Image (cartoon, rainbow, N blue to C red):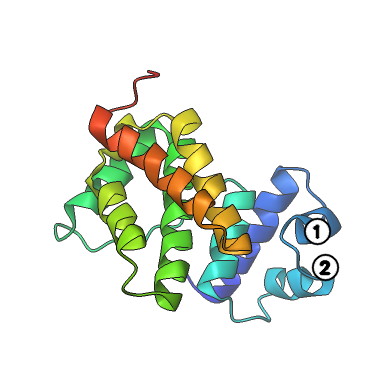
Amino acid sequence: MNAHQLADMLRTRRLQRGISQRDLAALLNMPQSHLSKIEAGKVDLRISTLAALAAALDLRIAVTVPSEDPAASRTDEAVATNPTAARHVTSILVHLSALLRLRPDDAVLLGMKAALETLASAEIDADRIAPIDAWLAAYKQHGDPQRLQAARMMLDRLVKAGRSPAR
């Protein structure tokens, strides 16, 4: 898919969802004129912007290397069975990647990333993974270590259960 095809797909999805450019731009905390340029294919998107757009439009971004990453194949299976949970897993990985760029040796962040990758994503209940996504987003914004600890504890519970107990 080239940049113009991606721009067309984002615009089409926004229109299918009945969301105005103004509303989507406000949701993503960006100027409406920037969103217009994105949809026209005039902007070289940052990965974080693409991830935010995908989450807001209920789309999935996938970059895979066949047969080399078992975690990726589990995530692909999850998309077919539970796209909402898979979207939260993707969002959490985006948050963790951004935080790890700032603090590459943070043991809690590294542990969370490893724990998330061990989960069989197809078994994750979206209601159980969404709060982890929210706590990480809040931590990223405010830097409050209690928010990070809350996200870590929730993730640990999911990993210990081996599957979502709420199924």
Q: Can you identify the residue that label 2 sits on? A: 32
As shown in the figure, which amino acid type bears the numbered disc 2?
A: Gln
Q: Position of residue 18 (x, y in %)?
A: 78, 43
Q: Nearer the viewer, residue 140 or 15?
A: 140
Mark number displayed over residue 26 = 1
Q: Position of residue 43 (x, y in %)?
A: 65, 80
Q: Nearer the viewer, residue 123 or 142?
A: 142
Q: Position of residue 84 (x, y in %)?
A: 49, 37
Q: Is label 2 in a helix, a strand or a loop?
A: helix
Q: Are marks 1 and 2 in contact (CB under 8 Å)?
A: yes
Tell which tag, 1 or 2, sits nearer the viewer. 1
Q: Is residue 143 left or right of residue 72?
A: right
**Residue positioned 41% across, 67% down in the render:** 97
Where, quadrant-wise, is the C terminus in this rendering?
Answer: top left
Tell me which numbered mark, 1 or 2, is placed earlier along the sequence. Answer: 1
Q: Is residue 157 left or right of residue 42?
A: left
Q: Nearer the viewer, residue 126 or 33?
A: 126
Mark number displayed over residue 2 = none
Q: Is residue 79 above or below residue 42?
A: above
**Residue positioned 42% across, 33% down in the render:** 82
Within 10 Å of disc 2 (Cα), the crowding (few <14, some 14-19, many 20+) is some
